[in-house]
Image (spheres, rainbow, N blue to C red):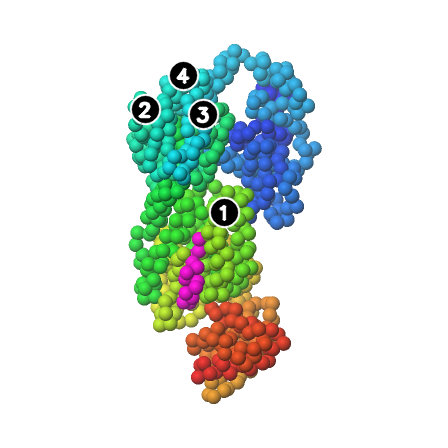
């Protein structure tokens, strides 16, 4: 027996249960399952992610310290890569992920002792005993003084570990004869097999190793090392979902490697086909990587025997081949078709009777399928939406439907933050600045954390060709792109995205992005459809279609409640416009029993006060001009608005247009280098810019957002640009 280094109590090792949390451990193992939950460990910062900090525990194990565990904001941490930190192991998951907790003690001197946690040495020992820890362990009674029955238990454990070393083939690599696929041949290792005869006979993981090599054909690859008595026969290709009925059989699987991890015994590959996934154990030597050429995302053919171990199916690998060329493509196509079929909604019906949505049924199906498929592929979904009321409502509709699917797909508590992200855009254009930020984040996540490239869904933004450069950057890296917008999609953009839902043609009835997004969301997750029924009504500033108003009323939102929610979201969309404000916006849109004086009512009151004050000033300074019986109202937004306070220019001009549409044909807002046009007439700002350039050719006049009616120019030509644009607009609406 040893004694506790803190209280001196006789213990098995060097620390008693009472004081284990008072010491810090230095980890010498190489597997996550060798860590002890609730212990504090010394670690080093590996890097940052949006959701926390990755910390290396020892040399071979990395855990995640989630931002929710920190005692400060993530961005306020001054840790750099390689810095020493102290963390608590909270959980070691079945997949090897390690959840870490924050330690208020961030210096070794703040602990009451330090012990080395070396799984190979049994009980923890003092670091000063490093050079002679075997003798120290013996002195403590943790090893040498152990009773004989403990030794017998250790021997039994060793035998079990040997049995867990599931197969006994060694691996060599040759080149397939068909010119394209890489072939991995397995030679039997009799010595390894003879060490664990009992394990083999008991069916606990050791495979027979007396078989010879046999050729395997098809798909451009050759597999060898058949172990059945019928040496020349090839295993039958089967679907993974049928393995329950094939225990004891040697089978052939074809699929993609989802993960590959090294245990203290075999290498374990998780292989997925179009029906399911299964773990496949391959053994070369205890703790040594088998088939090092095979990695995550490789398409493979695997031959092996189906076993049941500890209540779970496992395939004991006898031959493993990486498929290339036509063989790889055939398997990938089969998996893709099956995944699409699984992701596709059974039927597509509008939330309410809506001719616009009915005309877009197949487009709704396509975008909903893309989102559902991304979740099934464990691919992050990133929603990019305009920072407007319509954009936020539309983005949240997709968020509300997708998050439950993400929770069902993943067991991590932070999966809803890791696999779904909603990122507002300042305007309705996805420019190179936005695309560069997104590309940087996704490539960092891919390279540092082996994360798949996301599916980007653009909502109330991106439909016009001003976003083309941004889309093309994502396309270069193969990131998925879908779009939901309430304006017609430019042909160039339609080619640059994988799927789109948007009204077609100038005769299509007016709608909102939130209306279309809510219909997509209802088919991403039909269980969320009832939650979404009031959202379309919230997105209409006026002339709400009766069917959507009735749906909102049935959901408990009368006209006043709908108005309050819309105004509250519009106000909060302006502040911290680059943040998703997930919880706050959710409370505004789905708050139960909010009622008068509730959150939405309170924020709506602020919206109305701020907007009315700004409108009063703007109306007093509108410059009304009449040309050939066409009246245009002009507001100098530099001189007569608070440009950096609520409301934003776009929302202010929208409200002025709604209030004065009976008196003027267009409202124009002009600043030093920007001009915005609002009108009920179909004005093409690209055409306006092209015509105006003939009169002011040196003004650098450009239509920067056809979707939002925005032009830009150089400040020195402001007066000339304004006069010319007024003439062109008056001519177009005449």
Residue at x-position 46% and y-position 88%? 629
Residue at mark 1: 418
Write the residue at 44% across / 81% down.
733
Mark 3, secondary structure of its residue: strand
Could you tell me how far apart the alpha carbons at marks 4 and 1 are, in whole angstroms? Answer: 46 Å
Q: Which residues are magenta?
A: 480-497
- In the image, farthest residue toward the right: 109
Structural crowding at the residue carrying mark 2, measured as other residues with C-alpha within 10 Å and reported as few (<14), some (14–19) or many (≥20): some
Instruction: Calculate the distance from the C-alpha at mark 3 to the C-alpha at mark 4.
Output: 18 Å
Of mark 1 and mark 3, the one earlier in the sequence is 3
Indicate whether 481 appears above or below 209: below
Quarter the C terminus occupies: bottom left
Comparing marks 1 and 2, which lies closer to the viewer?
2
Answer whether labels 3 and 2 touch (C-beta < 8 Å): no
Asked which secondary structure carries label 1, the reply is helix
Q: Which residue shows up at 56% across the image and 22% down it?
A: 120
Q: Are marks 1 and 3 in contact (CB under 8 Å)?
A: no
Return the residue at label 4.
197
Image location of residue 534, percent across then percent down: 39, 61
The alpha-carbon separation of the residues under discs 4 and 2 comes to 22 Å
Q: Residues within 10 Å of mark 4 (few under 14, many from 20)?
A: some
Q: Is residue 29 magenta?
A: no
Residue 487 in sight: yes
Instruction: State which mark lies toward you, 4 or 1.
Output: 4
The residue where tag 2 is placed is 231
**Contact flag, marks 1 and 2 (Cβ < 8 Å):** no
Q: Earlier in the sequence, mark 3 or mark 2?
A: 3
Residue at the image position 32 percent from the left and 64 percent from the top = 359
Q: Earlier in the sequence, mark 4 or mark 1?
A: 4
């Amino acid at each position: 027996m040893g004694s506790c280094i803190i209280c001196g109590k006789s213990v098995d090792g060097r620390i008693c249960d009472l004081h284990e949390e008072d010491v810090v451990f230095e980890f010498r193992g190489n597997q996550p399952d060798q860590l002890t939950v609730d212990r504090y460990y010394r670690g080093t910062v590996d890097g940052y992610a949006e959701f926390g900090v990755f910390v290396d525990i020892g040399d071979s194990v990395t855990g995640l310290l989630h931002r929710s565990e920190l005692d400060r904001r993530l961005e306020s941490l001054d840790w750099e890569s390689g810095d020493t930190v102290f963390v608590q192991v909270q959980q070691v998951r079945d997949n090897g992920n390690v959840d870490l907790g924050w330690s208020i003690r961030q210096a070794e001197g703040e602990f009451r002792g330090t012990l080395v946690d070396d799984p190979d040495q049994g009980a923890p020992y003092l670091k000063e005993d490093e050079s002679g820890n075997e003798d120290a362990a013996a002195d403590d009674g943790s090893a040498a003084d152990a009773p004989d029955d403990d030794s017998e238990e250790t021997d039994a454990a060793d035998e079990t570990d040997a049995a867990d070393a599931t197969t006994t083939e060694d691996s060599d690599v040759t080149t397939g004869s068909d010119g394209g696929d890489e072939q991995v041949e397995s030679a039997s290792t009799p010595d390894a097999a003879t060490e664990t005869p009992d394990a083999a006979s008991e069916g606990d993981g050791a495979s027979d190793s007396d078989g010879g090599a046999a050729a395997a054909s098809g798909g451009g690859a050759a597999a060898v090392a058949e172990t059945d008595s019928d040496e020349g026969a090839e295993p039958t290709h089967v679907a993974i979902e049928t393995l329950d009925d094939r225990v004891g059989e040697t089978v052939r699987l074809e699929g993609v490697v989802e993960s590959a991890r090294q245990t203290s015994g075999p290498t374990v590959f998780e292989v997925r086909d179009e029906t399911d996934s299964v773990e496949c154990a391959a053994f070369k030597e205890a703790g040594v990587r088998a088939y090092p050429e095979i990695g995550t995302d490789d398409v493979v053919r695997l031959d092996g025997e189906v076993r049941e171990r500890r209540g779970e199916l496992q395939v004991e690998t006898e031959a493993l081949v990486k498929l290339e060329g036509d063989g790889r493509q055939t398997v990938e196509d089969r998996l893709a078709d099956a995944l699409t079929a699984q992701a596709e909604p059974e039927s597509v019906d509008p939330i309410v009777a809506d001719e616009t949505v009915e005309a877009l049924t197949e487009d709704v199906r396509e975008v909903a399928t893309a989102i559902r498929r991304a979740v099934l592929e464990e691919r992050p979904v990133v929603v990019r939406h305009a920072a407007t009321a319509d954009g936020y409502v539309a983005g949240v509709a997709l968020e509300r439907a997708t998050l439950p699917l993400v929770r069902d797909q993943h067991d991590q508590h932070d999966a809803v933050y890791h696999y779904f992200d909603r990122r507002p855009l300042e305007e309705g254009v996805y420019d190179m600045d936005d695309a560069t930020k997104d590309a940087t984040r996704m490539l960092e996540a891919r390279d540092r954390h082996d994360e798949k490239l996301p599916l980007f869904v653009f909502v109330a933004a991106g439909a016009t060709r001003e976003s083309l450069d941004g889309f093309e950057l994502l396309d270069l890296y193969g990131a998925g792109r879908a779009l939901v917008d309430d304006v017609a999609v430019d042909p160039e953009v339609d080619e640059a995205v994988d799927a789109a839902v948007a009204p077609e043609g100038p005769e299509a009835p007016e709608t909102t992005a939130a209306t279309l997004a809510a219909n997509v969301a209802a088919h991403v997750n039909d269980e969320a459809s009832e939650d979404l029924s009031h959202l379309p009504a919230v997105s209409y500033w006026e002339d709400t279609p009766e069917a959507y108003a009735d749906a909102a009323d049935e959901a408990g939102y009368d006209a006043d409640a709908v108005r309050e929610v819309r105004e509250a979201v519009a106000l909060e969309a302006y502040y911290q416009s680059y943040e998703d404000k997930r919880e706050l916006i959710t409370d505004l849109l789905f708050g139960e029993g909010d009622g008068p004086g509730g959150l939405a009512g309170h924020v709506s009151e602020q919206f109305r006060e701020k907007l009315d004050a700004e409108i009063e000033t703007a109306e007093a300074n509108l410059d009304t001009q009449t040309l050939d019986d066409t009246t245009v109202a002009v507001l100098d937004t530099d001189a007569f608005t608070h440009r950096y306070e609520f409301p934003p220019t776009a929302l202010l001009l929208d409200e002025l247009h709604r209030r004065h549409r009976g008196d003027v044909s267009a409202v124009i807002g002009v600043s030093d280098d920007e001009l915005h046009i609002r009108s009920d007439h179909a004005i093409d700002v690209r055409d306006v810019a092209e015509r105006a350039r003939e009169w002011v050719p040196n003004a650098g006049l450009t239509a920067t957002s056809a979707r939002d009616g925005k032009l830009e120019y150089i400040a020195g030509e402001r007066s000339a640009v304004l006069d010319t644009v007024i003439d062109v607009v008056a001519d177009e609406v005449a």
